[in-house]
Amino acid sequence: MNRYPPELAVIAPGGRREATVTMGPRSGCYLVSLRNGTDPQTVRSEHPEQVVKLILAARSGERP
């Protein structure tokens, strides 16, 4: 049996996946994969608001 971490997909109105958020090893962080990003970005679980800031900044073309 394979186990996969929970995943949250952020979908734009047109149906395109903008970001994917998963739990990191041992649930100490979130891994945020952005559509135009190369590597997942790590956000400590104590600061989930940073996940939202990363996604909004990527959608607007800014840097967080």
Image (cartoon, grey):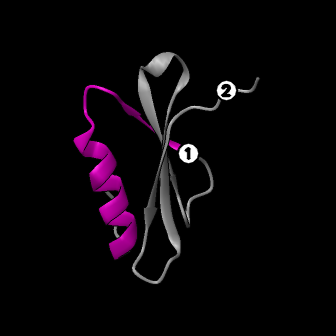
Is 57 contained in the magenta span? yes
Given residues 38 and 18, the one toward you in this image is 18
Q: Report the residue that reaches farthest toward the right.
A: 1
**Residue 54 vs residue 15: left or right?**
left
- Image position of 60 with respect to 58: above or below: below
Residue at (74, 27) in percent of width and height: 2
Q: Position of residue 53 (x, y in %)?
A: 27, 54
Residue bearing the label numbered 1: 40
Q: Residues within 10 Å of mark 2 (few under 14, many from 20)?
A: few
- Image position of 50 with respect to 13: above or below: above
Q: The N terminus is located in which quarter?
A: top right
- Image position of 34 with respect to 43: above or below: below
- Image position of 60 with respect to 25: above or below: below
Rounded to the nearest angstrom, the CA distance separating label 1 from label 2 is: 20 Å
Q: Which region of the structure is painted magenta?
A: 40-60
Q: Report the residue that reaches farthest toward the front.
A: 1
